[in-house]
Image: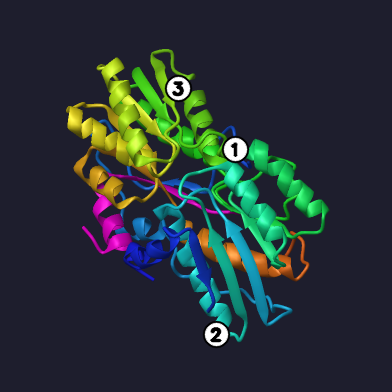
Amino acid sequence: MRNLLRKNRILSLVLLATVFLSACSFASSDTGSDENTVSIGSDDENGSASGSENLVSSAVDFDHELDNYVPKKNHYNFYFTYKTVHPWWDAVALGMEDAQRQYLEKGITVTYEYMAPEAASADDQKKRLSEAKERGFDVIGVDVADAEIISPIIDEMVDSGYKVMTFSSSDAHEGSKRIAYVGNTHNYQDGADLTEALCKKLDYKGKVAILVGSVGAPCHEDRARGAKDTIAKYNDMEIVATEYDMDSVDLAYELTKKILGDNPDLDGIICCNMSNPVGAARAVTETGSNTVIVGMDHDQEALHYLKDGVIYCLGVQDCYSIGFDTIQTAVKIADGNKPGELFKEKTDETTTVIYQEDAAIMLELLYGDD
């Protein structure tokens, strides 16, 4: 399962129609380091990196096998709704597809719908969940679009007997009645780690901006909170702008141009989702700015900007593992199991911070492109 996004291009055609029908992160850590956040490059004063090919390859784990759990049925039908149609969730879908294939090899059919709007919307997610309730799915999975709005709905569904889990990058609020969460449990720490790398690069002084993402999305808000708390530790660091780009490359580009126009001496930009590093890098390149960019994930264009030194570092999440583990967990939940020995209430997936030297290896690993 190498060259991830070669296959993603096929899946994207389906996802862009907002339907992927297959027939074959509010938990966060507020202090200290997290064992699931790994830095494989170095953020020395020259911006060089010392990551190895083995460590880069381990950032996304394609080698998964189903565990020894014996499902109670020979057919399962799931429903998954996530924030927005986007390549990040294409990668999650690949892990789901592989788990589905492995179950089929054991004589167990897993079917699922994988649904999202063209733009992130809690109201859209509410509607999708309402419709899904009427269709008899074994498990309903939610990548929470807005924790304030969606968490109470999840609680109501569970109280009414529906089996609901959360997955991907955004859990419901702490204390939610959802059965389990599979995804990034350390978004706050990811934001803090990326910002710490930026601060070190800037010698702990300068003006920075934050591009958050979608309003209310737990993963985006948590990363921004981690960034703000880190900046607050340093007297000579200042946040001059915080903007929501709604996970849109084009909006992130426009916002970055405006921020740079208002702050021509801007030293850094902290990007809290997969889209905004690309938009920010386009704007910085176009304007000739020397602003240092740190951000999230594995967008192909972002990795090229990393390789060229326009982006300083990226935190790459293991989307494939998120998808694979989501399907395994959903099967166990469908059988009536609760978190414990068979699966955790929160399955932790990794984020790996990579630097310029690591970019070519990551491009080859994910895209067959160096």
- Above/below status of 341 relative to 349: below
Using a 10 Å C-alpha cutoff, classify the residue at mark 2 as few (fewer than 14 neighbours), some (14 to 19) or many (20 or more): few
Residue type highlighted by circle 2: Glu
Residue in the image at 47% along x and 45% along y:
119
- Above/below status of 232 relative to 34: above
Residue in the image at 25% along x and 32% along y:
283
Q: Can residue 84 be seen in this view?
A: yes
Residue type highlighted by circle 3: Ile
Q: Nearer the viewer, residue 127 or 272?
A: 127
The residue labelled by disc 1 is 29
Coloring applied to the structure: rainbow
Q: Residue 74 carries which label?
A: none
The residue labelled by disc 3 is 231
Residue type highlighted by circle 1: Ser
User: Where are the magenta residues, as a range?
Assistant: 342-370
User: How far separated are the C-alphas under marks 2 and 3?
Assistant: 50 Å
Q: What element carries label 2?
A: helix
The residue labelled by disc 2 is 105
User: How far separated are the C-alphas under marks 1 and 2?
Assistant: 38 Å
Using a 10 Å C-alpha cutoff, classify the residue at mark 3 as few (fewer than 14 neighbours), some (14 to 19) or many (20 or more): many
Residue in the image at 72% along x and 80% along y:
73
Percent x, y for residue 58?
41, 59
Quarter assignment of residue 137: bottom right
Q: Give yes or no for contact between labels 1 and 2 (Cβ–Cβ under 8 Å).
A: no
User: How far separated are the C-alphas under marks 1 and 3?
Assistant: 17 Å
Quadrant (top left/top right/bottom left/bottom right) for the C terminus: bottom left
Q: What element carries label 3?
A: helix
> In the figure, is residue 251 to the left or right of 112?
left
